[in-house]
Image: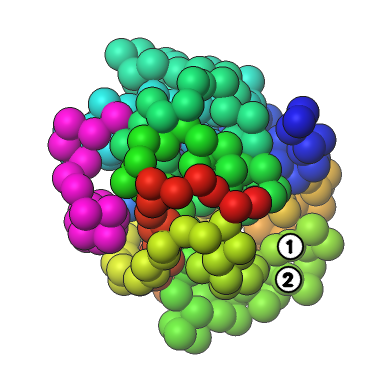
Amino acid sequence: MPPSPRSSLATSFNAIAALYAAVRPGYPPELFAMVEEFAGRPLDGADVLDVGAGTGIATRLLAERGARVVAVEPGAGMAAELRSALPRIPLVRGDGEALPFADGVADVVTYAQSWHWTDPARSVPEAVRVLRPGGALALWWNVPDTDVPWLARQEARLAERCPAYRPPGFPATVAGLLAPFGLDTRSGTVRWSRTITVEDRLRTLGSHSYLAVMSAAEADAVLSAERVELLARFPDGVLVEPFVVDVTVALRGSAAVRG
Ligand SMILES: C[S@@+](CC[C@H](N)C(=O)[O-])C[C@H]1O[C@@H](n2cnc3c(N)ncnc32)[C@H](O)[C@@H]1O
């Protein structure tokens, strides 16, 4: 089955890949510890396919944890950033809906905020096909912690001003979407934060697909308004950006996948 055509939102990252690499947040060590706990195995020594690897933010951290990682990325711009940042890590241009790998080659398949760009009806059977029996499909998203009022207000303004806005993270229950495939799933959350300048917060916003698809003038107008709001709230020009990482791990049993 050929992969489904990707939307302009899914491919919008390629034009802003350098910005993405410069400003997007990483992931905390506690996330990888949770993936290991749910997967029932260490990442150290595991064969990992990091799908939708982008500029390699998660790929690098997986490799630092001892995994033998192959990065999988469909987009030319994002792949070029990854190749220059992580020249020793194998990179395959490919799509999660038609993984260019043989059956049973991976211990873990990861999607670091990229699974929502795939159609689960295609990407889940593909992940299961390339996993060894007992292997794990790990999906996670860094989501702004909207229990924090200034962030909730900012997301609401962006939703109002950006026609293509989609809430960060996954819009449905990931475990619910995986259930029809007969996979054993576990989900959890990890809270963490980073301290950045107001300007970097604005650049981070600009790396989101809903702003990347707007004209430069429209995006600048949104970001200028956000600069005024943020400097009123953080006059020193520095803020703490709080995140919740939503993580779900699905285990491949020895039975064939349903899908
Ligand atoms: C938000 S970025 C995440 C990048 C990286 N994993 C990270 O943690 O920063 C989403 C990535 O998914 C990729 N992507 C879009 N559609 C995809 C698909 N069908 N299969 C695999 N990756 C896809 C995009 O090209 C982009 O690099």
Q: Is residue 180 left or right of residue 137?
A: right
Q: Is residue 150 left or right of residue 221?
A: left
In the image, residue 44 sits, relative to residue 181, either above or below, namely: above
Question: Looking at mark 1, is its residue's CB closer than 8 Å to ligand 1?
Answer: no
Quadrant of the rendered structure where residue 59 is?
A: top left
In the image, residue 46 sits, relative to residue 230, either above or below, namely: above
Q: Is residue 237 visible?
A: no
**Label 2 crowd bin: few (<14), some (14–19), many (20+), radius 10 Å:** some
Q: Are marks 1 and 2 in contact (CB under 8 Å)?
A: yes
| Residue 249 image offset from top left, x and y in percent | 39, 58
Q: SS of the residue at dot 2? A: helix
Q: SS of the residue at dot 1? A: loop
What residue is at 28 percent from the left and 60 percent from the top? 38
| Residue 128 image offset from top left, x and y in percent | 49, 42
Task: Determine which residue is flagged by label 2.
Answer: 159
What residue is at 38 percent from the left and 51 percent from the top? 253
Q: Which residues are magenta?
A: 29-50
What's the mark number on residue 51?
none
What residue is at 29 percent from the left and 30 percent from the top? 47
| Residue 65 image offset from top left, x and y in percent | 18, 38
1 or 2: tag closer to the N-terminus: 2
Assign the N terminus to one quadrant of the image: top right
> Is 114 or 43 nearer to us in this picture?
43
| Residue 241 image offset from top left, x and y in percent | 39, 66
Q: Is residue 153 visible?
A: yes
Task: Determine which residue is flagged by label 1.
Answer: 165
Kind of residue at disc 2: Ala
What residue is at 45 percent from the left and 53 percent from the top? 139
In the image, residue 63 sits, relative to residue 196, either above or below, namely: above
